Amino acid sequence: MSTESIEQPIKHKSEPLFSKKNRKLLSNPLDADNPVTVQILGICSALAVTVQMKPALFMAVGVTIIVGLSSFIISLMRNLIPNRVRIIAQLMVAATLVVIIDQVFKAYAYDISKQLSVYISLILTNCILLGRIEAFAMGNKPWPSLLDGIGNGAGYGAILMITAVFRELLGSGSLFGYKLLGDSYVGNGVMILPAGACFVIGLVVWMQRARNGYREE
Amino acid sequence: MPKPTNSYILIFMITLSVFSAVILAFVSESLKPAQIANIELEKKKSILGTFLDVSTMSKEEINKLYDSKVKTKVVSVDSKELDMSEATVKVSDEYRKDLKERHLPVYEILNDKGEVEYTVLPFYGHGLYDDIWAYVAIEPDMKTIKGVVLDNKGETPGLGARMSEKQIADRYKGKSIRDDKGNIITITMQKGEKGGGEVSIKAFENEPHKVDGLSGATNTGKGINVMFETYLQAYTAYLNSKLTTK
């Protein structure tokens, strides 16, 4: 059995927890580097869970917790994970967290968990999750990895919420289940279907690119 | 990190697996009571939901109302009352058994005088992908449907999963499970959809054994029809026995 010598990183002058660089890790994915609208990841679930605000909110919270924590844990173990099996190890950590979140929702938010059905377990196949672990957490320290994970989860969640506002308001005339537009409002059927989410997300992408400036590379 | 040996990789993965397994087992065990309570409440909600609106009721109200109003029993296919508690019968397991061997729970909804107001029967079946189920409330004439609650585990969202919506359940209201001669007849969901909401109900107003279908979910509809057919068959003896004593 070979003994593993874990290289101790050379101590730099300790960086403040919320240095400018670290704050960027949190804020960048919310806008300039948004996983949904800029990287176009996680679209499938964004179409599926945004019919109403409440499931979208739970999904957003779930994804943020899972991406943040799995980035953190993988980053803690990054020097122990053998390169050849790294994807399996990443999947195992992420899958464990996904199952825990699924079980917690089933115990304490049963109605929501029923509405989200398979999409909770499908967080595991969300490109954002494995993308952040593989691209960031494997090569960075735990604290920045946690921030990066939370930032990306929140960026995904923000788009879910924006989409859900339009879809629930136009599709059912309500927000968070409260009727806002009165009984005379006839819901727009397209908004209830996944196609509605396609339109809304497309418009969000357009607006964001118009504002931030976008050049085809 | 130097190139890890095979034994290191093996030990690393085994450790990680065992660690995850222990955590998951612990989480699953500690959350189980809350999850079971949720499933129980869901069942009570479905049973009460066949004849009243439970959407605004709190957990305590539902439990209280259920305890005061619902009398349960278990019967066999030939309508013999079985000496067992309804709580031990899992309809999701029963429906895989041969029709003759099934234990059939019956929920009797009592009014204030203790008379049977409605009879609620649980149905179970298989949709396109996974289990589907229904609770069907029948009026004392043992013929007219007071209301139903339909639900599914894994039908396609937006298509088959629409079966759980209230507007689909409303289509079954007032339909009849007996033909002119008084024999049990099933209610068939049609292929295709005339419209939604009121339009669907209007379209089949004069068809006591037909309801409007689910557009784009023909196979879920087939599953619902098989479920209604087999379970009405299973409960035929019970429904008839109640008819003669009246």
Image (cartoon, rainbow, N blue to C red):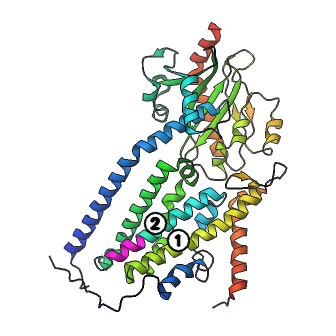
Query: In which image quadrant can residue A72 be found?
Result: bottom left
Image coordinates for residue A171, horizontal then vertical, percent: 75, 57
Is residue A131 visible in the rendered structure shown here? no
Residue interval drawn in magenta: A70-77
Disc 2 + disc 1, Cβ < 8 Å: yes
Q: Pick whichever of labels 2 and 1 is earlier in the sequence.
A: 2
Q: Is the residue B238 above or below the residue B52 in the image?
A: above
Q: Is the residue B144 above or below the residue B32 in the image?
A: above
User: Which secondary structure type mostly characterizes the magenta part of the structure?
Assistant: helix
Q: Give the residue at mark 1.
A: A153
Circle 1 — which element?
A: helix
Residue drawn at 53 percent across, 71 percent down: A153
Query: In which image quadrant can residue B35 be found?
Result: top left
Q: Quadrant of the N terminus of chain A?
A: bottom left
Residue drawn at 30 percent across, 80 percent down: A79
Residue drawn at 68 percent across, 31 percent down: B52
Q: Is residue A210 magenta?
A: no
Chain for numbered disc 1: A
Is residue B58 visible in the rendered structure shown here? yes
> As rendered, which of B220 and A167 lies closer to the eye?
A167
Image coordinates for residue B222, horizontal then vertical, percent: 64, 40
Image coordinates for residue A40, horizontal then vertical, percent: 60, 76
Q: Is the residue B8 above or below the residue A59 in the image?
A: below
Q: Give the residue at mark 2.
A: A66
Mark 1 Cα within 10 Å, few/some/many (few <14, many 20+)?
Answer: many
- Give the spatial CA distance, label 2 vs label 1: 8 Å
Q: Is the residue B86 above or below the residue A125 in the image?
A: above
